[in-house]
Image: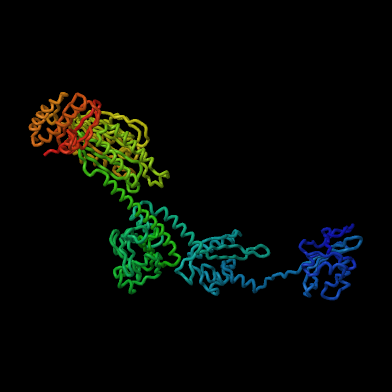
């Protein structure tokens, strides 16, 4: 088959396109080349596809075989002449397809050209596509059935025409609108702005599009709808404004979605500002009135259902829930609609439901409340009376659920607002309650953890402080503000050997149960190390090693995953007061220095080397020894006491110095008074204050003797001890004391180096101390029946209430303590 461009030469005649003067040939048309005598000399695949004839059946034949009727020689000659003149030709011809069908083909013939010396024409065609024509009935149907309300108004804003959709939107029959203005058939508050915009369009000639407003229909006057309207001028042939085109679209769903999003976003900033359950419930009620309802109350279950609440039993069918009123708000002052007050028990669920519907989680919508119905008059008679009295006419009750746990019930009611709740109001109510439920659940969980942390912390802090006869002590502890969680502050008073007393105060960085648990571990460690009679600097070094080891045991995760249990950053101050000498030795690890008030009222902060915080490892601690006069006041505190609201520690220490120097208050009253004066409002950190007033041991209660390094001296020493006990009036302890002294002095003479010294202290207990120059630690062992010795320390351990060894710069001291009769 040959195509238009398959000839060997195009000759010198015009191109197949007709030189731009004839009808344009399109590449997708069927095409053939016809010689001047009507013979087909070229046939394209497009022609084969259109008519079904292959090239073998078409080429060489007269084109007349394609016609459905007899040829018209006159018309053919006229077309040929037209094409020879270079103008081309186009027209509609009925052609016969190979399958016998008759096709209406839009045929186009080009200007004549030459192919191999023969006159030829390029003929193209395509099947005629029927054109869709707009009839009046189609146009009327289009306008009437359009989902967009349409209307035409004259320059006086009188309705000339409107479609069915607009008639349905307004609820006003077409006959009552035609010839009237919008203000005559629609409510004034709705029609006035519409007419104002229409006049603006008539005056300016500029269209106004997508004007949104709220309205309602006469067919459903209690249901609020949202509409978007557009107004455009109508002009005649002379461009004169002869009317207004008016189009309205119902956008209630879009408006409700936007309102819901805005309501939820606004609620997010107003609900859940604190981790307090009742505050959150009240914020929900405050937010919803009057935005959404006229009266709102929030009732929380005493025991939530489901979730991770152990022991929570779902209600049985017919049971009424045990709840408590947590929050409520009304447009009326004092919520007179309510039959219960905040904090009182309540078992309300909307009739005819019971507590079981809380598990389903679906809101209950009662658009119209009938206080005379059986459910109200029988089950809720008192509430039925309030419904009548205050005109409560519509209700939505939404179960509060979070994390598969039922927390309570929120109820919205309307009275002054005459529009009843409908299905469109359920989604906003559900979203408000869902947001509040998450906040309430977070608050419940936090309260539970905070309470557990407080209980743990209180159980780990000392319940009684024992300063003995050396110190009068008092303490004050103020937990952090609930929203900041429990901290890790701790303090302790530890009785030591030789009438001495250890004072310790510390602070673990962080909050929560982890900080409280770490505090307990450190307090136990300090007690254990203090029992070893370690000096303050060495005790802190051992404690630093312990904290470093605990920190290394922490899992390699982020702080959030660890729950804040890391102990790096803990601080501590440890002091040992000796009433025999009046000296206090102290050391600190990153903790604030103590405050000292002398009997004459002078206040100072000893220049105690600060030392690094616990847990850094490898850094030394230094101790400082100061002498405290009888009646001096020593104060240990955590940094929260002096940080204050301004975070200025120096100013805080100045305020502390002024507060502790006041006179005339007993120690147990002074301690809380100082805390209240420095911190009148809750703070984000725990506060601990430990005050101690010093006493010096009377010389009448302290005796000592140098003992010759001679076993024969033991008898004389025992005699001196017996006489001294008679002087003190505790002769009944003579036998056990003489045995203890005999064993301790004998061991010192036998195994240690001199000098040897014996000291007796008579205070709340009787203490025997034997010192020597050796650093060898005595060892308690159980002697066999055949051994001649080795029972000395065993006897001491049996006769004494406590015994031990402590080391000094000049050797060691072995001591034994007996309770007084």
- x, y (%) of residue 258? 49, 59
Q: Which part of the image, by quadrant, shows the C terminus?
A: top left
Q: Nearer the viewer, residue 228 or 575?
A: 575
Q: Is residue 796 above or below residue 561?
A: above
Q: Is residue 397 above or below residue 627?
A: below
Q: Nearer the viewer, residue 797 or 157?
A: 797
Using residue 174 as the reference point, say whether residue 407 is left or right of it. left
Total residue callouts: 0
Q: Nearer the viewer, residue 136 or 264?
A: 264
- x, y (%) of residue 765? 15, 36
- x, y (%) of residue 229? 55, 63
Q: Is residue 32 above or below residue 764?
A: below
Q: Which part of the image, by quadrant, shows the N terminus?
A: bottom right
Q: Is residue 718 visible?
A: yes
Q: Is residue 94 visible?
A: no
Q: Is residue 159 above or below residue 726?
A: below
Which residue sits furthest front? 786
- Residue 552 placement: quadrant: top left
Using residue 410 as the reference point, say whether residue 603 is left or right of it. left
- x, y (%) of residue 165? 55, 70
Q: Nearer the viewer, residue 793 or 520?
A: 793
Which residue sits furthest right? 117
């Amino acid at each position: 088959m040959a195509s238009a461009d398959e000839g060997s030469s195009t000759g010198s005649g015009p191109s197949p396109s007709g030189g731009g003067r004839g009808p344009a040939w399109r590449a997708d048309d069927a095409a053939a080349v016809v010689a001047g005598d009507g013979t087909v000399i070229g046939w394209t695949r497009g022609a084969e596809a259109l008519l079904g004839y292959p090239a073998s059946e078409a080429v060489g034949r007269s084109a007349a075989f394609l016609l459905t009727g007899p040829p018209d020689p006159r018309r053919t000659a006229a077309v040929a002449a037209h094409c020879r003149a270079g103008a081309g030709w186009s027209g509609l011809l009925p052609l016969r397809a190979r399958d016998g069908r008759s096709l209406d083909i839009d045929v186009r013939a080009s200007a004549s050209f030459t192919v191999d010396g023969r006159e030829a024409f390029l003929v193209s065609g395509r099947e005629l596509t029927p054109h869709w024509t707009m009839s009046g009935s189609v146009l009327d149907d289009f306008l009437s059935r359009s989902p967009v309300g349409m209307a035409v108004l004259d320059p006086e804003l009188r309705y000339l025409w409107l479609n069915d959709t607009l008639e349905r939107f307004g609820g006003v029959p077409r006959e009552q609108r035609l010839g009237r203005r919008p203000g005559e058939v629609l409510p004034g508050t709705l029609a006035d702005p519409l007419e104002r915009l229409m006049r603006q369009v008539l005056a300016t000639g500029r269209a106004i599009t997508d004007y949104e407003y709220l309205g309602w229909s006469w067919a459903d006057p209690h249901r609020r709808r949202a509409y978007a309207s557009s107004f455009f001028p109508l002009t005649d042939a002379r461009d004169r404004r002869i009317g207004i085109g008016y189009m309205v679209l119902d956008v209630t769903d879009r408006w409700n979605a936007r309102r819901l999003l805005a309501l939820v976003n606004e609620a997010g900033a107003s609900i859940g500002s604190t981790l307090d359950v009742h505050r959150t419930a009240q914020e929900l009620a405050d937010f919803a009135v009057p935005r959404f309802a006229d009266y709102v109350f929030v009732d929380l279950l005493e025991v939530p259902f489901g979730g991770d609440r152990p022991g929570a039993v779902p209600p049985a069918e017919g049971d009424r829930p045990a709840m408590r009123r947590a929050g409520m708000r009304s447009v009326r002052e004092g919520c007179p609609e309510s039959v219960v007050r905040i904090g009182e028990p309540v078992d309300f669920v909307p009739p005819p439901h019971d507590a079981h519907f809380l598990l389903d989680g679906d809101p209950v919508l009662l658009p119209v409340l009938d206080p005379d119905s059986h459910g109200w008059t029988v089950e809720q008679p008192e509430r039925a009376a309030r419904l009548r009295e205050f005109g409560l006419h519509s209700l939505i009750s939404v179960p509060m659920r979070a994390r598969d746990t039922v927390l309570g019930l929120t109820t919205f009611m309307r009275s002054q607002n005459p529009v009843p709740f409908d299905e469109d109001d359920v989604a906003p109510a559900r979203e408000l309650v869902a947001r509040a439920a998450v906040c309430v659940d977070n608050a419940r969980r936090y309260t539970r953890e905070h309470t557990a942390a407080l209980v743990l912390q209180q159980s780990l802090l000392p319940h009684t402080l024992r300063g003995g006869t050396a110190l009068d002590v008092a303490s004050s502890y103020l937990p952090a503000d609930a929203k900041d969680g429990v901290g890790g502050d701790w303090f302790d008073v530890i009785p030591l050997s030789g009438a001495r007393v250890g004072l310790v105060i510390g602070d673990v960085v962080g909050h929560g149960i982890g900080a409280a648990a770490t505090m307990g571990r450190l307090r136990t460690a300090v007690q254990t190390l203090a029992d070893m009679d370690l000096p303050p600097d060495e005790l802190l070094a051992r404690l630093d090693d312990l904290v470093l080891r605990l920190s290394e045991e922490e899992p390699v995760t982020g702080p959030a995953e660890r729950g804040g249990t890391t102990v790096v950053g803990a601080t501590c101050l440890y002091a040992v007061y000796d009433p025999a000498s009046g000296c206090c030795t102290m050391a600190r690890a990153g903790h604030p220095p103590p405050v000292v008030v002398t009997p004459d009222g002078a206040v100072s902060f000893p220049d105690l080397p600060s030392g690094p915080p616990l847990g850094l490892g490898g850094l030394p601690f230094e101790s400082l020894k100061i002498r405290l006069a009888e009646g001096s006041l020593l104060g240990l505190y955590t940094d929260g006491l002096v940080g204050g609201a301004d975070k200025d520690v120096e100013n805080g220490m100045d305020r502390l110095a002024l507060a502790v120097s006041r006179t005339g208050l007993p120690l147990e009253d002074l301690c809380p008074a100082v805390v209240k004066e420095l911190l009148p409002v809750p703070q984000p950190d725990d506060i601990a204050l430990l005050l101690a007033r010093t006493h010096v041991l009377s010389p009448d209660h302290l005796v000592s003797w140098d003992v010759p390094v001679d076993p024969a001296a033991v008898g004389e020493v025992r005699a001196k001890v017996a006489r001294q006990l008679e002087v003190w009036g505790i002769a009944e302890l003579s036998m056990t004391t003489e045995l203890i002294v005999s064993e301790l002095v004998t061991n010192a003479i036998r195994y240690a180096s001199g000098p040897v010294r014996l000291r007796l202290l008579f205070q709340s207990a009787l203490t025997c101390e034997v010192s020597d120059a050796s650093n060898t630690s005595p060892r308690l062992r159980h002697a066999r029946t055949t051994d001649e010795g080795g029972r000395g320390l065993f006897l001491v351990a049996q006769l004494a209430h406590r015994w031990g060894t402590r080391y000094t710069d000049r050797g060691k001291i072995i001591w034994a303590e007996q309770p007084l009769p």
